[in-house]
């Protein structure tokens, strides 16, 4: 029998909306998994962390987290067929930053509509500036570039999703070389202003790519210590994963402990699209929670652990066939409430 761990970023509704969302949610599979458990615990987010709770949990689970610092870059590079030899590297995400008189805000990179032709053109124009500064730039895909970090590996950086909806001023890279980073950022921002790719993007109603976001510094030797699979996840995480596809496919073929991260809720949650969030949750109940419940109750899975999160907290729920026999526990979604 196998053990399954299912990580679901943003499956915990935000506390202020949880009563209304739980009342509207129809998810009997999830209700059974959450109500009839052998163990559960809730963890508040680290107030000093510059990453989301599920990112830190996953980083620690696969051995790519040093304390509260995520170290994903080298593993992601290998996933894109790039060689991270020669020191530390950082993930670089092309970004759109909204600038006003009182705040900076970075949009969700999932919603950029960034196609390869535009990304390549912007990359090619910026690469000499990175290379001349000693921070070689390499291309992974439209959303994912890589930069040789050098001394910038010591910068205290934040993951892109951690900045969602926040004043970016509080999340900019910090440390001894932060001024050097900002200098390169300013040069690239000026270069990309009125760049033909951005002119075309704005004409089509897409946001201009007016900045870049470095994070996830890692040395070449940083390798995942445990395999995992994912779906609906950002390209950098998909590049690290050893398996892709549906949860049902993983469940059918698993013969060892399996870890699966499903990121389908993230875009709706970051956009505060709660109608979309409910739709995704109910789809998850059909294609993920109910099959997992069946695997547990039939004995095909010895144990199942759900790791659910929102921006400020994470909760773990463990169930088994024996726990599911606790018929006196009425299935309910109340454990999604704060």
Image (cartoon, helix red, strand yellow):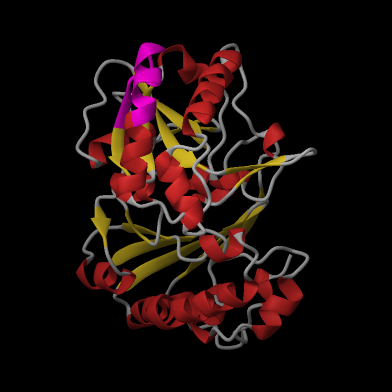
* Position above or below: 113 against 106: below
Indicate left or right for 49 with 72 as reference. Answer: right
Would you identify the image quadrant in which residue 162 lies?
top right
Between 37 and 278, the one lying in front of the other is: 278
Number of on-image labels: 0
Q: Is residue 200 visible?
A: yes
* Position above or below: 60 against 186: below
Between 135 and 209, the one lying in front of the other is: 209
The x and y percentages for residue 26 are 58, 86
Between 259 and 282, the one lying in front of the other is: 282
The x and y percentages for residue 101 are 78, 38
Indicate left or right for 123 with 185 as reference. Answer: left
The x and y percentages for residue 14 are 70, 63
Between 183 and 328, the one lying in front of the other is: 183
Q: Is residue 145 visible?
A: no
The x and y percentages for residue 6 are 43, 62
Q: Which residues are magenta?
A: 125-138
Rendered residue at 21%/63% (across/down)? 255
Q: Is residue 187 magenta?
A: no
Rendered residue at 45%/51% (across/down)? 201
Rendered residue at 58%/58% (across/down)? 309
Q: Is residue 136 magenta?
A: yes
Quarter of the image where the N terminus is located: bottom left
Quarter of the image where the C terminus is located: bottom right
Would you identify the image quadrant in which residue 19 lies?
bottom right
């Amino acid at each position: 029998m196998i053990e399954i761990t299912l990580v679901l970023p943003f499956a915990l509704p935000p506390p202020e909306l949880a009563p209304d969302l739980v009342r509207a949610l129809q998810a009997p599979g999830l209700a059974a998994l959450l109500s009839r458990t052998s163990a559960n615990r809730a963890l508040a987010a680290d107030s000093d962390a510059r990453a989301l709770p599920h990112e830190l949990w996953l980083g620690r689970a696969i051995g790519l987290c040093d304390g509260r610092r995520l170290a994903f870059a080298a593993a992601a590079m290998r996933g894109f067929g790039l060689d991270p030899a020669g020191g530390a590297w950082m993930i670089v995400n092309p970004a759109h930053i909204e600038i006003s008189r009182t705040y900076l805000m970075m949009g969700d990179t999932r919603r950029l509509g960034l196609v390869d032709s535009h990304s390549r053109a912007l990359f090619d124009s910026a690469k000499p500036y990175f290379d001349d500064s000693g921070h070689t730039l390499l291309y992974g895909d439209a959303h994912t570039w890589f930069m040789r970090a050098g001394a910038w590996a010591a910068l205290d950086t934040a993951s892109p999703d951690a900045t969602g909806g926040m004043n970016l001023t509080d999340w900019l890279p910090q440390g001894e070389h932060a001024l050097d980073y900002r200098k390169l950022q300013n040069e690239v921002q000026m270069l990309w202003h009125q760049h033909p790719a951005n002119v075309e993007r704005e004409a089509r109603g897409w946001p201009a790519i007016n900045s870049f976001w470095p994070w996830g510094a890692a040395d070449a030797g940083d390798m995942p210590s445990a395999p995992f699979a994912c779906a609906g996840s950002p390209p950098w995480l998909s590049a690290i994963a050893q398996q892709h596809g549906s949860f049902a496919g993983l469940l059918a073929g698993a013969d060892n402990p399996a870890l699966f991260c499903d990121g389908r809720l993230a875009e709706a949650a970051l956009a505060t699209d709660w109608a979309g969030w409910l739709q995704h949750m109910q789809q998850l109940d059909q294609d993920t929670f109910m099959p997992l419940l069946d695997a547990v109750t039939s004995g095909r899975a010895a144990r199942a652990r759900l790791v659910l999160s929102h921006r400020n907290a994470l909760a773990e729920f463990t169930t088994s066939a024996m726990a599911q026999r606790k018929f006196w526990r009425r299935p309910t979604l109340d454990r999604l409430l704060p």
